[in-house]
Structures are given as structure tokens and as C-alpha cells.
Amino acid sequence: MQTERAGCISQIKSLKGDNRQFQSIVDEKIKEIEPLQQALGKLRTANNAGRGVGLCSSEEELNNLVCLSPSSF
């Protein structure tokens, strides 16, 4: 029983370390995505104000929109 408990505690400690690593990676990715989300928000605002159009319906439409939009970032 004592051996099982020690094994479980060891596994929990190991998982806590893994969790910290995963959380660190997620936090880093969120920071990388932030500027992209802000730029997308600006693009959507400019698009909606200028053309009254909502979301793009295809990747091609988005690419065309991005290529044609004035740089506001």
C-alpha cells in the first residue's frame, strides 16, 4: 500500500511538471497569435465599414481581400 502511494505521488509530480511545460507552450502561442487577432479585427472593421460585408466565405476571397486592402497594421 505504501509503495503504491509513493508511486502515485511520483506520477502526480511528473504530471505537474508536464502540465507546467504545456501551459508555458500554450501561453507562448497565445502571445504569438495576439497580433494576428488584432490585425484580423482591424481588417474586419475596415471591411465592414467600407463594403458592408461580413466574414469571407472562402480562403480565396480572404486572400483577395488581404491583398487588396490598404495596410493599416
Image (spheres, grey):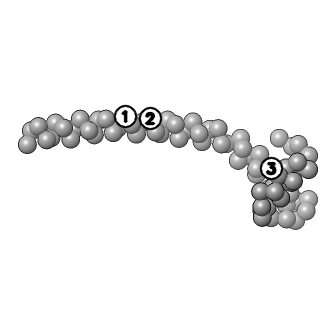
Q: Which quadrant holds residue 6?
A: top left
Asked if the residue at tag 3 contacts the one at tag 1, i.e. Cβ–Cβ closer than 8 Å, the answer is no
Cα separation, mark 2 vs mark 1, equals 6 Å
In the image, residue 69 lies at what x, y percent? 90, 49
Please state which amino acid type lies under the numbered disc 2: Gln
The residue that appears at 23% across and 35% down in the rendered structure is 10
How many angstroms separate mark 3 from mark 2 (CA)? 33 Å
The Cα–Cα distance between marks 1 and 3, rounded to whole angstroms, is: 38 Å
Marks 2,1: beta carbons within 8 A: yes
Residues tagged 3 and 2 counted as in contact (Cβ below 8 A): no
10 Å crowding of disc 1: few (<14), some (14-19), many (20+): few
Q: Callout 2: helix, strand or loop? A: helix
Q: Which residue is mark 1?
A: 17
- Compared to residue 24, the image places residue 70 above or below, namely below
Q: Quadrant of residue 51?
A: bottom right
From what the image shows, is residue 12 above or below residue 67? above
| Image side of residue 24 versus residue 45, left or right | left
Checking the image for residue 31, the label placed there is none
Q: Position of residue 11 (x, y in %)?
A: 26, 38
Secondary structure type for disc 3: helix
User: Quarter holding the C terminus?
Assistant: top right
**Image label count:** 3
Q: Which residue is mark 2?
A: 21
User: Residue at image x 77%, y 61%?
Assistant: 58
Label 3 sits on residue: 42
Q: Amino acid at mark 1?
A: Gly
